[in-house]
Amino acid sequence: MKRIFGVMLIAFCLTLVSCAPACETNESFAMNTIITQTVYTSNTQVISQNNQIIRDIENKMSKTIPTSDIGKLNHRSGENIAISSETAQVLHCALIAAADTDGAFSPALGGVIDAWGFDTENAHVPDSAELEKLLSSADYRAVQEAAYDANIANAGGALIDLGGAVKGYALDMLAQNLSANNVSSAILSLGGSIYATGKKPDNTSYKIGIRDPYATENDYMAVISTDGVFVSTSGIYERGFTENGKYYHHIIDPKTGFPVENGLAAVTVIADSGIMSDIYSTALFVMGAERGVAFAEAHGADALFLTSDRQIITTAGFAKKYDLQIKGQWQSADNR
Ligand code: ADP
Ligand code: MG
């Protein structure tokens, strides 16, 4: 119950309310998050295929499933383990991103994240000696994928957590399935990651709401209209707990092992692929607004940062491409 309660939609599909006849909708819970799908198709199989794709990915990449690739890598960390090509691909992307972001995104934080217990009944601030010990074996550079082509990996003494990348990867696989089924209009949401393609039957663009981090789950601070993008948001509200009056969220600074405290409340990234939008939303949150804007601009991603004092900071590309309809007390901090 607590688990489900802790998971909230970052952004929501404003189109779910109206579904034309040749349209399938579905809401489910997997990957520890709520999944919604609206697919304009008369093929009733598409959604069940999508749900199977999501289950397969979860069974391979969830660290809480002992028989998954990640379960096996973590249980026998330090040993070479045969894994599926799909997990090898995601791990490969995550390790490249870790090197590119100078460790801001780290797939080796599994031990530290488990110690916080964000998604469990036992969520608590770990003791500092325990954190220090876990951090010392949370080095992404120790994770080996030398035999990547043969789909062998080695967690190198660390515990792997791909929670910041898997939902985005799943969206990529779902997008492929939509296109294999000739679907030209759909919107899918996996927690904080959204994929929209094509126009709605009334020829208008999909609208994606960006949640106000300081309001309830259905309050959005801006809406973007789009015909085909991957949008991921990392926000302080997604998973977290309060202890002794202080709120602790789930995006970890790999340098300290503590939740990032840099004045940001949420980061939204629009990129060409689901996996990169997902990875970058976490990475840019860790980097902070100043470094994050420069990184996103240099890596072809459009990003929007929301600060705890209700300022909006965007990359130049974001401001140019997306007509942000800002609501409430939010204000643009840049004069680009
Ligand atoms: P969510 O998975 O809730 O949609 P994010 O995409 O922001 O949110 O990813 C956060 C998840 O990524 C955490 O729940 C955790 O599993 C993992 N994580 C936390 N901090 C980091 C980090 N610095 N680098 C990589 N993964 C992280
Ligand atoms: Mg992310």
Image (tube, grey):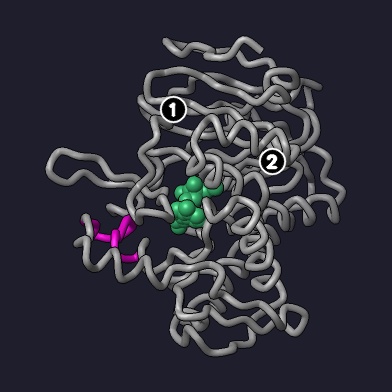
Q: Amino acid at mark 2?
A: Phe
CA separation in Å, label 2 and label 1: 20 Å
Q: Position of residue 72 (x, y in %)?
A: 50, 83
Q: Nearer the viewer, residue 15 or 231?
A: 231
Above or below — where is 148 with respect to 275? Answer: below
Q: Earlier in the sequence, mark 2 or mark 1?
A: 1
Give the residues drawn in magenta, as a range. 114-124
Please give the name of the residue rendered at 62% of the width and 70% of the height, measured from the top-left corner: 56
In this rendering, would 77 be left or right of 101? left
Q: Determine which residue is flagged by label 1.
A: 218
Q: Determine which residue is flagged by label 2.
A: 230
Is residue 19 found inside the magenta-colored segment of the image? no
Q: Position of residue 227 (x, y in %)?
A: 78, 30
Q: Position of residue 212 (x, y in %)?
A: 44, 25
Query: Which of the 4 image quadrants contains residue 322?
Result: top right
Q: Amino acid at mark 1?
A: Asn
